[in-house]
Amino acid sequence: MPGTFEATDDLTIILIESDETYRGLMRKSLERVPSARRGLIVREYSEAHEALTDLPPDGQAVIVCGEKSNNASGFDRLPEFIRADVGPVILVTSHWDERSAAEALRVGAADSIDKPTAIENPAALGKSISGALRRYHLERSSRDLTKRLMLANKELEQKNTTIAEM
């Protein structure tokens, strides 16, 4: 079903929004995402630096971050969230336009969505989360498989060298 994501395991949403009213509205929207009620944990923060000190284990979260805050913008904090590798980052913008969406993707966000859509359309928010999770886990699997392939290749090269020296 479009706009849903499976909550077979607990999924933590790190919700970062400096405006308390918008943060509350975003939480309510997250709670209304189809299939999200079971196993969904929403952690709310007013500032990105607060969230950075309280991240769950890698691969276990989706970060939904407002583009602006009092101390640093979501754009500024994206590299830190990406290095933490806890899950995909979705940037929530005051208004969506192609330039800001392209910039969000360029600096590493998995997706961007505007606040009005995220608040008023839980299915669109769910679709964004679902797609971001799917891409994150595919990219992570690809990285892991590439590492394994490189190690296996190195072992074969060492064996070939040993055989050639005989």
Image (tube, rainbow, N blue to C red):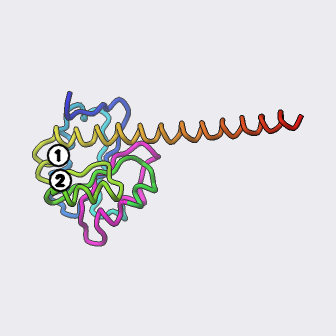
SS label for mark 1: helix
Quarter of the figure that contains the C terminus = top right
Magenta extent: 51-78
Please give left or right for residue 137 compared with residue 5 in the image. Answer: right
Question: Where residue 8 sits in the image (x, y, percent)?
Answer: 35, 29
Nearer the observer, 133 or 13: 133
Residue 64: which disc? none
What residue sits 20% from the left and 60% below the top?
99
Residue linked to disc 2: 24
134 w.r.t. 65: above or below? above
Queried whether the magenta region covers residue 106, the answer comes back as no
As drawn, the residue found furthest toward the bottom would be: 71
Amino acid marked by disc 1:
Lys
In which image quadrant can residue 65 be found? bottom left
Quarter of the figure that contains the N terminus = top left
In which image quadrant can residue 81 be found? bottom left
Nearer the observer, 56 or 154: 154
Dot 2: within a 10 Å radius of its alpha carbon, few (fewer than 14), some, or many (20 or more) residues? Answer: some
What residue sits 73% from the left and 38% below the top?
157
Please give left or right for residue 148 compared with residue 117 in the image. Answer: right
Q: CA distance from mark 1 to mark 2?
A: 6 Å
In which image quadrant can residue 78 be found? bottom left
Q: Are marks 1 and 2 in contact (CB under 8 Å)?
A: yes
As drawn, the residue found furthest toward the right would be: 166
Question: Where residue 114 sits in the image (x, y, percent)?
Answer: 16, 53
What residue sits 25% from the left and 35% below the top?
36
Residue linked to disc 1: 28
Queried whether the magenta region covers residue 57, the answer comes back as yes
Please give left or right for residue 154 compared with residue 104 in the image. Answer: right
Question: Where residue 156 sits in the image (x, y, percent)?
Answer: 71, 34
SS label for mark 2: helix
